[in-house]
Image (cartoon, rainbow, N blue to C red):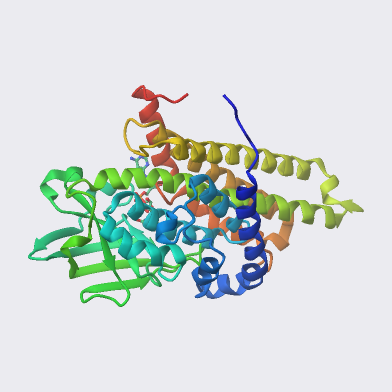
Amino acid sequence: MAISFTFSDEQQMVADTIYRWASTWLEPQMEELDEKDEFPPDFFKQLGELGMVGITIPEQYEGAGLGYTEACICTENLARISNALSMTWGAHLILCADNIKRNANDALRAKYLPGLANGTQIGCLGITEPGAGSDAMSMRTTAKLDGDHWIINGSKTFITNAPPGQTLLFYAKTAPELGPKGISAFIMEIDPSPPGYDCQKIRKFGMRTSPTGLLSFDDVRIPKENLVGELNKGVAILTGGLTTERITLSGCAIGSIRAALELSLKYAQERVQFGKPIAAQQMIQEKLANMYVGYETARLLMYSAASYVDSLTDKRGGKGTTLDIKAAASLLYAGETSVKATLDGIQIHGGYGYCLEYPIQRHFRDTKLWDIGAGTSEVRRIIISRELLAGTKWV
Ligand SMILES: Cc1cc2nc3c(=O)[nH]c(=O)nc-3n(C[C@H](O)[C@H](O)[C@H](O)COP(=O)(O)OP(=O)(O)OC[C@H]3O[C@@H](n4cnc5c(N)ncnc54)[C@H](O)[C@@H]3O)c2cc1C
């Protein structure tokens, strides 16, 4: 078995292109955007012009036809500058467009994928509800067929990209009496807002440039043909999508670990106290060494999980799959390590680390989400231990 730990020329080009763009176009704006909690309106247009939006979407739908490994390269390198906008990119591409690619019929693919892949349309995914977070299967949003339309009632919360978005992929109960076996997936066009639809922006302490919405549906009508996949088979779409989501979004946390290490290395060598740079102190060196080990370990977990999912023909996730273990482990480790690394980074910066002009604190505020979003750390541990105890293949 050959194991390669180096990127191909094409993968390195993806990493360099996205990081160069993020550090020249995005970085100078980040402090102000974060303070005002504003999403840069040209974000997807700019990335679309670089060919960096539809990375995993086939070329026939205006994508780049690459894999989840390349998607992780994008999230990691974008998050070195903005964890929040890396999440926004991932929610658009992996949670919405990629799930449509994997599960919708040809007509829906042809209708929705080109705009999502070239960055002229913004996508989002609605699973979570006010009363159904970790217990997503207890969702209460319903879809009832009425002639040629589905009538949607209910609500979704914490939906990344919904405020500026156009295309919502979401789940609703089509047979509530069947529990998880009565859930289906749908596409709703949300811009312009259809009658009965409302979206309120949620205020957050982190991920501030990534817009988050609380959605409500009051007899919203969507065309019958906007059912994605088979009726009442939505759980398979949801669990499969969560695995690629967890792997790809690990890159958001990993980009912040790398940023914390880069910022801290620079600061620790410049800041002089007691007549020498603080980097000369062993207690500072210990933090830097721990950040490095955390970064390398998190990266290995993410890229090995990404290369595993790229190698699978059937990318099914959920109970009984090795993919579920690898995806949960990748985000569990990356999330918790990034919180520790960014906190250590603030400590190295002393009082300046507490000030808004130093980006280290923004990485901490943003990356705390990775203990929570895409299934909390507790839920990821439940998944991993459930599969280990069930005898699912893990090596
Ligand atoms: C900024 C942001 C962006 C998001 N983007 C999206 C999005 O685009 N689409 C989407 O659908 N959702 C999104 N989410 C929602 C996110 O996935 C949920 O917040 C998450 O799944 C947790 O659900 P909850 O917040 O309802 O917490 P709860 O489920 O209420 O959990 C509260 C606490 O209880 C713990 N807990 C719950 N059950 C158990 C258990 N069985 N054992 C042990 N501990 C348990 C949890 O781990 C957590 O610590 C986003 C959230 C945020 C904050």
Is residue 113 visible in the rendered structure shown here?
A: yes
Q: Is residue 208 left or right of residue 288?
A: left
**Residue at (58% x, 40% y) in the render:** 298
- The residue at the far front in this view is 60
Q: Is residue 336 above or below residue 382?
A: below
Q: Is residue 50 above or below residue 229?
A: below
Q: Is residue 7 above or below residue 45?
A: above
**Residue 356 image offset from top left, x and y in percent:** 64, 68
65 vs 357, nearest the viewer: 65
**Residue at (48% x, 35% y) in the render:** 308
68 vs 151, nearest the viewer: 68
**Residue 69 image offset from top left, x and y in percent:** 53, 45
**Which quadrant would the N terminus be assigned to in this image?**
top right
Is residue 274 visible in the rendered structure shown here?
A: no
**Residue 47 image offset from top left, x and y in percent:** 54, 66
Counting labels gives: 0
**Residue at (19% x, 61% y) in the render:** 225
- The residue at the far right in this view is 275
136 vs 281, nearest the viewer: 136
Location of residue 235 by image quarter: top left
Location of residue 22 by image quarter: bottom right
**Residue 253 image offset from top left, x and y in percent:** 55, 50
Q: Is residue 65 left or right of residue 136?
A: right
